[in-house]
Amino acid sequence: MVSDVSERFAALPTAAKLLLILTAVLLPIGIALVWIAADGTREANTALRERHQEQTMTAARQIESLIARNSLALRIAANGALAGGEQGACERAQRALSIAPAIEQGFQIHSTDGRLICQVEDLANHDLRLVAPGDFQLQIDPNAQALLVRVGVIGGMMTGSLEREELLAAARNGRRALTAITLLDHNSEMQLLAEPQQEGSGARQLVTDWPIAGDRLTVRTSGLAPEITTADRLVLLLPLLMWVAAALITWSLVSRLLVQPLRRLQRAVIRFQPGDSPETLPRKLGPATEIQEVRDSFARAISRVEESEHEMAGALEGQRRLVREVHHRVKNNLQVVASLLNIHGRSAETPEAKAAYASIARRVGALSVVHRNHFAELEESRGIALRPLISELAAELRASAPPEARGMTVELDVEAAYTTQDVAVAVSFLVTEIVEFAMLRRPQDSIEVSLRRTSELTARLVLGSPVLAPGDDEADRVQFERIVGGLAKQLRSTLERKLGRYSVDLPVFPPT
């Protein structure tokens, strides 16, 4: 029975498997979600009640701060007023209060025995007791809807009042959650705020008493503390929790059904080497038939690539044979031309004709040297090596020199460098022209040939000999200078002429 169910499940598409597994897994998660949301609701309600408690405490502290500011202002004004005697006390106190911001300007000044000295505002209907210097007294006047404040100073007392609106403004100050605020002393009370309660608002009414001013007054606040119900918590969090659960489960399933088989296939592909059989790829790659198809497609692609590589290898080998044949025929043709020039040179009747044949043969020999070096480096495609090229060219020139010049010395100081065939041809002809010019005029002098890198992509070729210095044969140098100057232009450089020394820059490949 279990085997039949497993086979039926394995035959389903991958998407159907994911749907069935998600359905089975999300049900217990939903049951656990109810308990988690209930616990979260309790914590949220506690936090809201604490926030309401903080708001009510702040309202009480604001009222206390307002009373403290007015008491301090009255004390300062009373000290200044009574310090100059009873005459003009109200005027001095009024001036002191006028510069204090947000302080009531109405007041009364009494002597230490309770006698009224002067007043700016009538504060009747109160029975405030005598206050000693440094002390103060608070009393609610329910008729005037105000809070009376009396402070004692040296020489008398000063009484002021705080209106209900001032106290309410200080208590609210942006705290709109409070619905009722009441100020109480030991005998009376004054209601600062009384808003009608809203039924069915989903909030809880909380009443809190806060003693202020050294327990002389009590601020009683009442407000609605919002309550988050379990239903609200479920509505807010359920989609998010379901999405998280579904994402995690989907990732796990995709990892098991798709990612892990794909990684197995990836590792097998990385280990696959040319020439291996496609059968070395894993056959079992999980229940996803799509991955099996990818594996088969890769095997077919490998077979096609191998067939193409075999065809390309055959075509490349044929091309190499053709290139070798072409180079072989070019080398033979150059040798034939050199042999014909030597035969005609030996049978020439005049010395001028023999010298002309020898000069042409030397240039054909220089081209042959370049061709041989180019063919030697063709397999590695590194370009033509200049060191063996110049060395072989120097040997060829000494071998083809006239009898009187075969003892000429060619000193070489050449660094290893590689360049293109076009540059090598120009270098060979330039060396041939200068060495021939030197050995035909002063074969007893040696000639120096050096090649040094000047940068990663350039090198400097220098040829030096005393015969290269300007002399009396300026007329014979015109053709020579024209030739070597043209060869330098082929190198896209300028031929520098110094005393007995020619130098030119040429492009080379970067060192490996």
Image: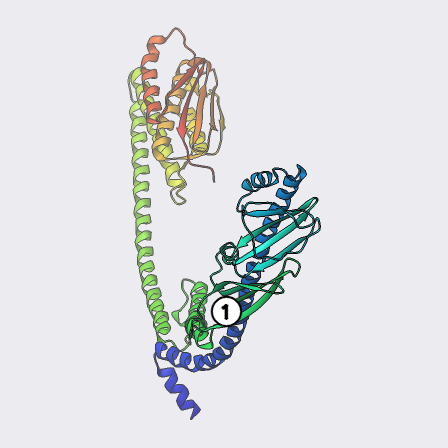
Location of residue 352 (image quadrant): top left
492, above or below 1, in the image: above
Q: Nearer the viewer, residue 11 or 42?
A: 42
Residue 63 position, x and y percent, is 56, 56
Q: Quadrant of residue 381?
A: top left
- Which colour assignment does the render follow? rainbow
In percent of the image, x 61 and y 65: which residue is there? 187
- Is residue 332 left or right of 113 when viewed as pictured? left
Residue 503: x and y, percent?
Answer: 42, 21
* Residue 76 figure quarter: top right
Residue to which mark 1 is pinned:
225
Q: Amino acid at mark 1?
A: Ala
Q: Residue furthest top?
A: 472
In screen coordinates, is 282 left or right of 74? left
Between 483 and 7, the one nearer to me in the picture? 7
Res. 158 visible in picture? yes
Total label count?
1
Q: Position of residue 85 (x, y in %)?
A: 66, 38
Give the camera-side residue of 17 and 39. Answer: 39
Residue 246 visible in rendering: no
**Residue 126 at x, y = what percent?**
59, 57
Q: Quadrant of the N terminus?
A: bottom left
Circle 1: element type? strand
Q: Is residue 57 above or below residue 238?
A: above
Which residue is outermost to the bottom? Answer: 1
